[in-house]
Amino acid sequence: MHRRQLLAASAAAATGIALPAPAAAQTTDDGTQASFDTVMAFMGAMGGGDMDSMGALMADDMVWQNEGDPDLPWVGTWEGKETIFGFLGTFSQNVQVTHWENQDAFASGDTVAVFGRMKLRLTASGAETDEFTFALRAKVRNGQVVLWNWFEDTYAVSQAFHAT
């Protein structure tokens, strides 16, 4: 697959936009492709606010990890589908994503990595971050996400969250 198609597929998945051609991972292994498709579908459902599709794509024992500043209420580890949905409620009350751009995505077996840029507006302070990079490492089992390990510039996010 050409890099341009991969990036378009990733960006469309993040915004919930359907593409005329199916997204494909960089290898032809069926398991790798299935993992890639699952993560992109999950990301697309999340971006579109489709909680039903997200729930169907989440394993009951899924683990969501956000690394960074522990003063942010959405940084930490959440285990289990119901706990994760609770966390997502906290996140959505505190954060509005104002820009999202997937730049690279790779898959190997059950593991998918996505890298991109984003901007946030923090609800309580009204402050907006400058654009910053993010990275995601996700794992898939039996067509469902079992790990969502998120990395972002929590220094910039924390500065905006605590702005007065």
Image (cartoon, grey):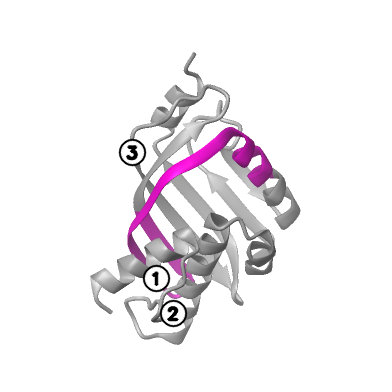
In the depicted structure, whether residue 56 falls above or below residue 80: below
How many numbered callouts? Answer: 3
The residue singled out by tag 3 in the image is 131
Q: What element carries label 3?
A: loop
Q: In this view, does 22 lie to the left or right of 139?
A: left
In the depicted structure, whether residue 52 falls above or below residue 91: below
The region drawn magenta spans 87-115
- Amino acid bearing label 1: Ala
Extreme top residue here? 164
Q: In this view, does 76 lie to the left or right of 131?
A: right
The residue singled out by tag 2 in the image is 33
Is disc 3 surrounded by few (<14), some (14 to 19) or many (20+) residues within 10 Å? some
Q: What element carries label 1?
A: strand
Q: Is mark 2 on a helix, strand or loop?
A: helix
Q: Which residue is drawn at the image coordinates 52% and 56% (left, top)?
A: 47
- Amino acid bearing label 2: Gln
Q: Distance between the residues labelled 3 and 1?
A: 25 Å
Q: Position of residue 108 (x, y in %)?
A: 40, 73
Task: Please tell me whether the stretch drawn in magenta is mainly helix, strand or loop.
Answer: strand
Q: Which residue is drawn at the image coordinates 45% and 86% (left, top)?
A: 30
Q: Which residue is drawn at the image coordinates 51% and 63% (left, top)?
A: 44
Q: Quadrant of residue 137?
A: bottom left
Residue 99 falls within the magenta-colored stretch: yes
Rendered image: mark on residue 107: 1
Which comes sooner in the sequence, label 2 or label 1? 2
Is disc 2 surrounded by few (<14), some (14 to 19) or many (20+) residues within 10 Å? many
